[in-house]
Image: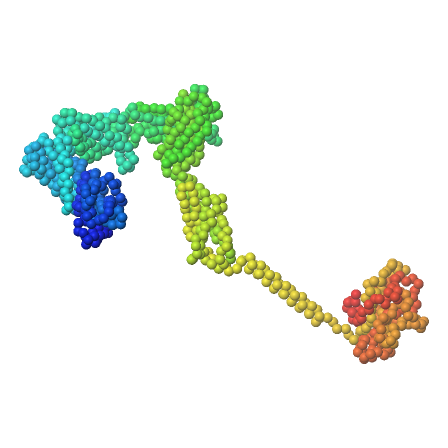
Amino acid sequence: MDPLPLLLMLVVIPIGIGQRDDSCSVDPKDQFIEAGSSTEVVCRTSCVHGETFWTLDNKSVDKSWSQTINSTHVVLTLRNFTHHQATVACRTVDTQHVVGGIIIVTYTKPRNIFCILHYDDESQVGVPQLLTCSWEHQFNSQLNVNYSVLYSSALHTSPIEICKTKATTCTVRDFYASEQIGLYVGYDFNITVRAKACAWEAYSDSYEFNLYQILKINPPKISFAHFSDHLLVEWSRSYASEKHHCQVKFRKAPSADERTPVWVFNKSLNTEENVKIPIEELESCTNYRLSVRCALDEAPWSDWSREKTVLTKLNKSQIRLHLWRKVTGVQSDGVRKVRAMWMEIPSACPGRFTYELKQTPDQEDAIQASQSYTLCGRSTCDVTVNQGAHRINLTVSLNEVLLAEDSVYVPAVGESLPRVTDIQTSTRDGVILVNWRAPNQSVRGYMIDWTHNGNQYNWKESKYTNANLFDLLDKEPYNITVTPLFDDKTGPGTQVHQICSRVGDPSNVAISSVQSYDKSADVSWETRSNGACSSAFVSFTVFYRTQEGPLLNITVDSEKQNILLKDLDADTQYRVYIEATALTGVTTSSERLFKTNKFDPNFITVLSVCGSLIIVLVLFLGLCCAVQWKRFKDKPVPNPGLSSVASWSSSINHKSMCLFHPFSNPSESTYDKVYTEQTSNSSTPSLAISSTGSTTGHQNGEYADSAAGRDEKLADPVMMLHPCFSEETTAFLLSESSPGSPGRPGSPGSPYRSQASVEPQTPKTGKVCKRVSGKEQEKMSLKTVYVTLDMFENDQAH
């Protein structure tokens, strides 16, 4: 709570009350007390009628803390007060009015003083001339606090100010050379720190110090002696008469990696002046960085000496070749390729090292093959063996002196040896954990080898059915093989493929195509893998929006890589992007723009097809009309001089039924005769005149004109083609002798001649065509047929 408004309230309210009685107040006024101390606050209540109570930061305090001395004085006792700052107020019970109040601020005294005697630099010797003291102090950072370091001893009992500062540390130079202090080496002294602000002053407790308990000596200057099995660190020390504690720190070089292990060797020294400390169990031919620090008994440690780099010598007892092999399958020529691998001697070791492989057939095959030797490089060597069992021996020599040797067994093709089963792998923080089931036969151990590219291998031996693989490449797939080791043989290996050291980042996602329609859009995307260990996607989320609209999204599972966005606005631009979610993170595609169509493309397609069909139909109809018109224009007009007109029944030509063809007289004409019409009475039907001059009405086999009201005369006969063979005669009647209506065929003034069918004069008894009866003939419709002679000439009468 901000104390300023409350202080103003405390000032204003007592003034109003003081108009009635000036005796109401709270004492003492605002005060500063040391944290953890006790204080009393008095409230004068002579101007108040009724009871009062106390509040601390607007919260009521326990009544047991308050005591009424008389009717005008109430005392509040605050014990072990630790509030940094608090407002205390006296209030009336009935009206809650503030009678008076104060603000109490606490302060602390400096504590945990620590002093050391030290040198300016590492080259100085003798008594150090610097005294540095530091302490702890909690205070309001807005206050201006000044500190003073006060010195006292058995010779100077009155404290002497030796250092001033505004910080919580202070250094005194030429401490023992100061004439004001006048101290002698070996005397104890006391240090007190005073903290002073504008409103308060605090003194720390007095701390006593001894020279040898606060003396920080300089680090030693070290040197090294090299041996094959250890390293000897040497230096000369000051204050040889005093007990020392020293530490030797060493680590492999380079040491830029903070995870590089650091070893510290502790050594206690008494009175020896020259120090020699052996450091053992260091790796051969390896660079180490070493530094040393020392301290007097109960005194602070010196700084670490400057690091020095030293190369250890080759230790023959530490050489471990760890020979192993990888065997391929049988090749076309019947041999197998064996890659021998071993832990080489560090390249930092001086000298010329020789590695040699010796291939020895197993005892059963020793008679069939001989030994062979191969000189190899530093860490790998490839040799070939047949399908039998072999033992490969490796020897390493330095200047033709044997240093170490090792051997490994290569089983024969088809050799029945047990193998491990049920290999299971898992990863955790870049480490692959492998476990398996042991074979039924007892083993002396297992060899585990792993590779990420098939060329570089790592391997280790284990006596257990599990192993942890460290120092792996991050986010890389590994092939792991576990092989059981027997007393003098090795079984077949069991391999696990593609185990990632750590699941990598998810693959990239990109929009491949967007097919837009009027109210929808088909969005497709594709993923691009970041490697074999990329994390698999579990879902895709498609985000889309218009320029001003809200952001919409649709989520699908990892099996789909396209989606149809529905309910879109036509003729509108949209933005779309894909967010792919995997177990290890989220990846987002770039944004893509697309615009919906005004109309449905299917509607436009249908409209185009229908329009094309209509155009084709119109063109086709136009072409047909043109052809018909051309035929009409090209139709020949009959020559009136060579033409005649006759009423002809269409059914006669088509429905005459021929019973059989005459064979007796094939020379007879195959055409029916056509006769010209005579002008008849307009009120009576025309009569056909027979050859004997008789008039007949309706007779079988006769042809009569049924057109009522027409005056026609028989004309000259004209031959018509008929499908039946007829023996009937035909008479031609001239149209000039028959009167008729002008303009009509057969009438006066018409250029055409009229024709009518008549009964032949003398029908033959051998008639072969069945004629239609007169009654049926009346029912038949008659047609007017124009016949010209040039039709027969042009072979058009059919």
Tell me which corner region of the image, top left, top right, bottom left or bottom right, holds residue 636.
Answer: bottom right
Q: Is residue 283 above or below residue 729?
A: above
Residue 788 at what x, y percent from top left?
Answer: 79, 71
Q: In the depicted view, which residue is nearer to us: 649 or 82?
A: 82
**Residue at 48% across, 46% down:** 556
User: Residue 315: x percent and y percent?
Assistant: 27, 26
- Residue at 44% of width from left, 51% of height from top? 543
Occupied quadrant, residue 230: top left
Which quadrant, please, contains the C terminus? Answer: bottom right
Q: Can see residue 614?
A: yes
Viewer-closest of 285 and 362: 285
When asked about the image quadrant of residue 480, the answer is top left
**Residue at 35% in and 34% down:** 471
Q: Give the percent coordinates (x, y) of residue 458.
A: 37, 31
Instruction: Evaluate whether residue 123 shows in this view.
Output: no
Q: Which residue is located at x 24 percent, y 30 percent?
A: 264
